[in-house]
Image: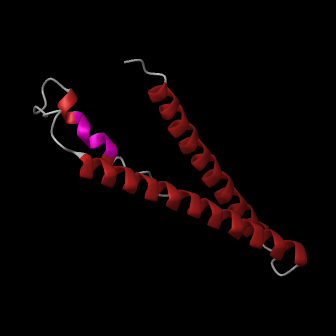
Amino acid sequence: MDVINTMAVNGLEGVSRYGTAVNPLQDNKNENVTSFESLLQSAMKLVKQTEDYSNAANVEKIKYATGESTSLHDLMIAQQKANVSLQYTVAVKNTAVEAYRTIMNMQF
């Protein structure tokens, strides 16, 4: 599985009092767009991979049910991969939604 890119966290060096000083008026628009874009692409790859595992599990289930495959082992592995991938995708989604809600509830 592909772990979501953490490039969005790279800008936190300026938050530390020991890090280099960052000018808040400096235009970092291009860096933020690329970071968000790469984060979004990584999330889309994760969803695609989860869908692929689910489709492979369905194919194995159909093969086993029709008698084309007698390997229960392959069926269980395919189903477990699909299950773990789905759980991971849901966990990433829940974390992203929780972060969004936290940001939206901040008071300035």
Q: Main secondary structure of the magenta part?
A: helix
Q: Quadrant of the C terminus?
A: top left
Place of residue 81 in the rendered image (x, y in percent of width and height, measured from the top left): 64, 58
Quarter holding residue 17:
top left
The residue shown at (54%, 37%) is: 97
Q: Residue at x 61, y 45 (%)?
A: 90
Coloration of the structure image = secondary structure
Q: Residue furthest bottom?
A: 68
Q: Is residue 91 left or right of residue 105?
A: right
Residue 48 picture location, percent across and down? 57, 63
Between 70 and 1, the one lying in front of the other is 1
Q: Nearer the viewer, residue 56 or 15?
A: 15
Position of residue 85 in the picture relative to residue 108 (left or right): right
Tell me if 66 is positioned left or right of 47 in this view: right
- Where does the image place residue 73, in percent across and percent down from the top left? 74, 66
Does 69 appear above or below 82?
below
20 lies left or right of 93: left
Q: Magenta part of the protein: which range?
A: 8-12
The x and y percentages for residue 18 are: 12, 26
**Which quarter of the figure has residue 94?**
top right
Looking at the image, which residue sits at the far right? 66
Q: Residue at x 72, y 66 (%)?
A: 57
Residue under the point 76% across and 71% down = 60
How many numbered marks, from 0 up?
A: 0
Front position in the image: 84 or 46: 46
Is 95 located above or below residue 104 in the figure?
below
